[in-house]
Amino acid sequence: MENLGHQVMDLTIPHDLLIDILSRNPAKSIARSRCVSKIWKSILLSPNFTELFLRRSLSRPRLLFTFFEDESLFFFSSPQPQNLDENTSLVAVADHHTYFQHVSFGICLPINGLICTQDRGWRYSVPVICNPSTGESITLPVLELDRADEKRYFGYDPIDKKFKVLCVSCPSVGTSNLYEEHHVLTLETGELSWRKIECCLPYYLLYNYGICIDGVLYYPAATNIYEDVSIIVCFDVRSEKFSFVNKPEGLELGHYSTLVNYKGKLSALQSKRGIDYNEIIDGSMGFLKLWVLVDHEKHIWSMKIYQIPSMWRTVIQKTDVYFAGITSSGEFVLSPYSSNEPFYLFFYDPEKITIVRVEIQGIDQRLRNRKVYTFIEYIEDVKL
């Protein structure tokens, strides 16, 4: 191009290069950049861009910290420590992502950057899907049922790449707490609506937690109102079919989530403090058991016992912690129930027999000494 006798270079950036450059930005910056122009919005919402951003995020997992305060949900996150060395003192600085107002209770494990929570209204609880990284949220339709109780679970189908919310409810009449009615909602359909689906076996729900692994949503249940957890419900997110796995004898599943993802398989962690099995863990824990579902159809589980090394008591001391999960490299992560100062996470490698304490800084002072939900392997995404 020639202008007034001077050569002018064409500085137009190739489309693929622009997508590559933008995908390296934080999710929150990308969400703001959608407002620059219609062209930018089109680029940043295109499947090519969102899939590239997600692939990059998978290689840089984060820790996500969630707080409830004054009917609002606050999110902080920090890079998840890698290649931990027990002789290293680590500090991770958490960034304040965002907060969502009028969201008062209930939260499911994050899946591909999204979280399902709910707000209890005057008559109905309303499910809300949040993206902590971008600050965006979607309020789902109310499922108006004459039911006494509802529990919701969040799942993802990696083949069709669709998020789904499963609602399980029990009747409002009589004394039965039998959960026998099931509805599902798919996010990527344009028109959000609940559909009723069938389940061959009604069951009792004692605890409200679940985990989605490779397109299957798992949560504990009981087949008898007078017994504790006896089965694991398995909901195939893609086919929307139910199956069930018997809980192995000796595994106790309690109020707090002990279901974890261990190398792509459904697993459960069980700790022992003194002579009793206990969900609250501290420096006095003697050993822990890892149960792994080996064969879904044959109900086969494997179990391994890890003796806790003497250094455990020195590092954790009297801090009450719980299992936040297992990293992709096999480290067991333990988090305090509240964000005391200093706020530490503990990474236990049962193969190397090492325990590393990581201090988390950057949490807002007004959220100190509050209940905290810690999620590991959090993947940022820009879709909602």
Image: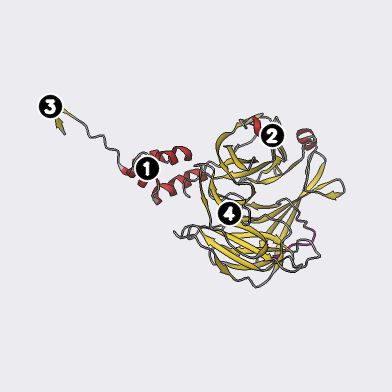
Asked whether the beta carbons under mark 2 and mark 1 sit within 8 Å of each other, the answer is no
- Nearer-N-terminus badge (2/1): 1
Other residues around mark 2 within 10 Å, as few (<14) / some (14–19) / many (≥20) = many
Q: Residue at x 14, y 31 (%)?
A: 2
Alpha carbon distance from label 4 to label 2: 31 Å
Examine the structure image and report whether residue 247 is included in the region drawn in magenta.
Answer: yes
Residue 113 in view: no
Q: Nearer the viewer, mark 4 or mark 3?
A: 4
Disc 2 and disc 1: Cα gap in Å?
A: 37 Å
Q: Estimate the x, y position of residue 149 in percent, counting from the top left.
A: 68, 61
Asked if labels 1 and 3 touch by Cβ distance under 8 angstroms, the answer is no
Q: Determine the residue located farthest toward the top in the rendered image.
A: 5
Q: CA distance from mark 1 to mark 4?
A: 33 Å
Give the residues in magenta: 245-250
Residue linked to disc 4 = 127
Q: Amino acid at mark 4?
A: Pro
Instruction: Indicate the amino acid at tag 2.
Output: Tyr
How would you classify the magenta stretch by its main secondary structure? loop
At label 3, the amino acid type is Leu
Q: Which residue is mark 1?
A: 19
Q: How far across and down, in percent of the image, does residue 178 sit? A: 72, 67
C-alpha span from label 4 to label 3: 62 Å
**Residue 361 visible, this orientation:** yes
Residue at x 54%, y 43% (from the top left corner): 132
Q: CA–CA distance between discs 3 and 2?
A: 65 Å
Q: Where is mark 2, residue-wise? A: 344
Q: Is residue 266 left or right of residue 225?
A: left
* Residue 267 position in % (x across, y down): 68, 55
Q: Is residue 61 above or below residue 340?
A: below
